[in-house]
Amino acid sequence: AMGADASKNLDSEVVQEQEQEEQRVSVASRDDEFHIPWRVETLETHGRDYPTQGSCFYPLRRLRVRPQRPLLFVDSAIQVSDNNYREAWHGAGERRLKNVFLSLEWLPLHSSEDEMHVLHFGLVTLAEGESLRWMMHHPTHLSGRVCMALRVVSSGRYMDVADSFALAVPRLREERTSADLLPAGAAWTPSPAPSVERNGALLLYRFLSNDMFFSPGELAVLEEVVRNVAHMDRLQFFTDCLRARRRHRNHWEDAPVAALFLPAEHQEAMRPLAILTALRVGFEALPERAAQVPPAAKLVAQLRSLHERVAKASKEQLGGTQSTGASTASLPIDMMARILHDIFPSVVKPFTPHDVEHALRYLCHHGAAGAGTRTPADVGHPHHAPLHRVAEAFPVLQEEFLHTCLAASRVHGGFQEER
């Protein structure tokens, strides 16, 4: 009966994956995704920081979906299968992330003294999960040397547990004992409080999967798991993963996961931070148009208009007595917000000028990932948004970037008209 239930559960996960994949079309690539076979014997000698040669697992702390992005410095025992996301894809263009469903937990039974009782966690694909499940129910030469269990990431429920695993892991042994002591016919629905030991890896996989809804207890555990990761690095990692998924919902600011991105004393800033993050995603897409040969005419016109309007407005702010370059200009925050809203409607949509103003105010007063430290001049004008500050957060707006586009257009004899 247990085998039939497990098969039904796995079939359900496959259907769910197919439904999620059909949600919307993604621009990220899914080429070169054939499964790489690996020897299960590597589970027996698997290292934490440097996996055994031939193993498919690597620490999640080494995963990044975009180059030069922050890493999640978490426990190296929490691993990801190369068949889920290959390290070789780093820097090779954006890749669409696979949906997260199954986690493998395993324990080598004849480990060295240093590795005794070290439980390993690995995010596996559905195909890998099916093969591992077959092994758990058919004795092999590895059965007495490695014990395994498969869990459903979304619910934390164990899909399949080898008897040797239940005996070797104390918390599972205790849960089984509690179930055995219940009166006949009594329903047993274990609901132990979330803990780092029991739920830490699974909650981190849900975070990687861009799950936005966690209970207060789960958030406390997840906060402990990522305690060594800066708040803005967590947000950058989360939003990078979100960009690489087929999801309609991408507004995390009103979901429980938002508590991980700001210290408790700054939770009121969640809305402007969310807007700022959305703007960053929009502006980061613009350089792709500039990389065309020759550069896109519309983008170059927008960038030129930005720098001209900012320089002109800054001169007017100074009474027209002195000229200032756009790169050193500083405007009232509401004025800078209106200029961005007017010139880049496709990026700023669906936000209002008032929304953009709130985001820029947060940027200028608190900073954000990718923005440098505030200068004395910035501090002296608390209600102004210096263009250099805005351009640090959105590099495509830097004056040097415009000059690069203009130089490229001269080399190729003009601009490329956009449809």
Image (spheres, rainbow, N blue to C red):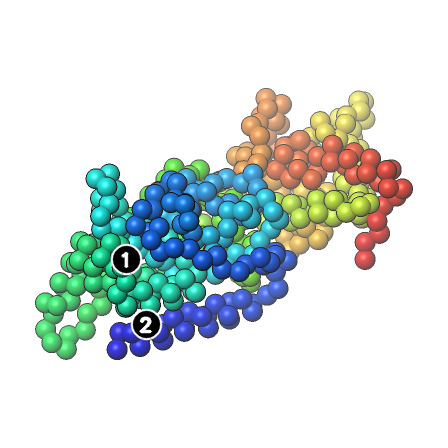
**Three-letter residue code for mark 2:** Ala
The residue where tag 2 is placed is: 6
Q: Is residue 365 above or below residue 37?
A: above
Determine whether the residue tagged by mark 2 lies in a helix, strand or loop. helix
Spatial CA span between label 1 and label 2: 22 Å
Q: Which mark is residue 142?
A: 1
Q: Which mark is residue 225?
A: none
Q: Which percent across, then down, holds residue 321?
A: 81, 22
Q: Quadrant of residue 171?
A: bottom left
Query: What residue is shown at x 29% (from left), y 54% (from top)?
Result: 106
Q: Is residue 248 left or right of residue 397?
A: left
Quarter of the picture containing the C terminus is: bottom right
Q: Is residue 330 above or below residue 295?
A: above
Q: Is residue 140 above or below residue 86?
A: below
Q: Is residue 119 left or right of residue 410?
A: left
Q: Is residue 179 left or right of residue 159?
A: left
